[in-house]
Amino acid sequence: MSALVLTHVTKRYGTRLVLDDISLELARGARLGLIGPAASGKSVLLKLVAGLEQPDAGTITVLGDTITRPHVREVDLGELRKRIGMLFQSYALFDFLDVAGNVAFPLEQRGGIPAAEIAERVAARLRAVGLAGSERKLVGELSGGMKKRTGIARATVADAELVLYDEPTAGLDPVTTQKIYDLLAADQQRTGASVLAVSSDVAALAELVDEIAFLYRGKIVYRGPARSIRDAPDPLVRQFVRGELDGPLTEAIG
Amino acid sequence: MTGLGAAALRLCRELGGMLVLAGSVLRALVPPRLDRRELAKNLHKMGNRSVPIVVLTAFFAGALMMLQSGPFVKKLGATSLAGWGAGYAVLREIGPILIALMFSGRVGANTTAELATMTVTEQLDGLRALAIDPIRYLIVPRVLSMIAMLAVLTVIGDAVAIGGAAVVGRLMLDIEWSTLFHSFADNLEPADFLHGVWKSLAFGGAIAIASCYFGVSVRGGTVGVGRAVNAAVVASAVSILVLDFFVTYVSAP
């Protein structure tokens, strides 16, 4: 069974077409990276998959459940969302809780998990992302990198079946970036979770995922193996990944 | 003309949005599954911390009522009615309205700013992504706390305002304590007190819905937070005065 199926999904904001008739499938346990120019709809696609936004057309099936209207309402998504972990680009940390409170939150809200086990899992997760000793810090006291790592810890603490990462290493230094990708890869190996990750750091992303899809002007114009993404047959993708100034992408976006 | 139409449409959209939010809050109360920590935190923050400002405002409001009416009462030799005049105005009108306006400025504006900041930083989406309903988790405790605490603060304010009126009556207008006491006790009725409490419940609901609605419907990033607070304070003040008219009309003696 697939972890994720998008069928002819279209999303508009006003007159702006953000996603244009996208179809996409992700097998259980598979890892897909999503790249593309700024404002190409990558984050919107993640929000659609998490059920935080509804498409204007098309259907989305996540872990076997169709999450698009009229098949489902917001109130029906609760159980499914417990099986999904999500890291937001803007962290979306709760500023009324400290670091440990944020990471513990998904476990506490599930109910039925003993407090001692929650504390143990939170401590282990914070150690893994290099935040041991920062448990009692409030969100406002954290640097951008620390917020990102807290967000990663919160997204992965509950061992979700599908994990959505929106720019997991933006704002982190190269060493921490590598550590985080190693951690995410190890987590995925351990849990077997399906991964859909958006990142601008294509080289690091290629270490985490099996395949990379290129989103351009609302459409997925390329999907291929992550390891050979630099040599993708599509010149748009090659120019984007290599960061070259001259090429069809520059001509298209000016 | 186009501007007038756009303003009318905006007003309808906002009124409709507030009604939908009020409906969602009522629906979330059945069955009543509340986050008790969040409720207790809001009750404390909205109630306890508002007591000093309410006491200060109410004391001077009561004192002012006596200061305005006292000289005429004395001139007409009707000192036995001095306490009643001030008390009647305080319990039925001045107390509930003034305290509601103070509450809206302090608690309502704070709630809007807090929710709007959470909205623009995607914390509400963060809650939804973790299978938490933001209405049930954030809005319902705030609405219940505002309604309950405004009623409690109005009762406290009523008592303090009557005290303020009595102090001014005795110290500045030289009316005997016993005269003031009998003036309050013999002429004011439980209905006068309850009239103000009913109003405070209605005002609390209006402030709560307006402040939460403008908080969660904020647009335009951090700049929008200021606009949302402004809109919430204006909407609350207008709602208080409109509701005051209708509650008074419906329950007029």
Image (cartoon, coloured by chain):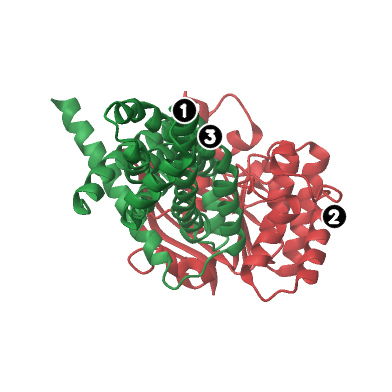
- Residue pictured at 66% horizontal, 51% vertical: A226
* Residue B87 x, y percent position in the rendering: 37, 42
The residue pinned by badge 1 equals A253
Q: Which mark is residue A223?
A: none
Q: Colour of chain A?
A: red
What amino acid type is highlighted by mark number 2?
Arg
* Residue B250 x, y percent position in the rendering: 20, 53
Secondary element at image label 3: helix
- Residue pictured at 48% horizontal, 52% vertical: B152
Q: Which mark is residue A127?
A: 2
Distance between mark 2 and mark 3 Cα atoms:
50 Å
Q: Residue furthest left?
A: B1
The residue pinned by badge 3 equals B56
Image quarter (top left, top right, bottom left or bottom right) of the N terminus of chain B: top left
Q: Is residue A247 above or below residue B164?
A: above
- 1 and 2 marks on the same chain: yes
> Disc 1 vs disc 2: Cβ atoms closer than 8 Å?
no
- 2 and 3 marks on the same chain: no
Q: Colour of chain B?
A: green
Q: Nearer the viewer, residue B152 or A125?
A: B152
- 3 and 1 marks on the same chain: no
- Residue pictured at 54% horizontal, 41% vertical: B114
What amino acid type is highlighted by mark number 3?
Leu
* Front tag of 3 and 1: 3
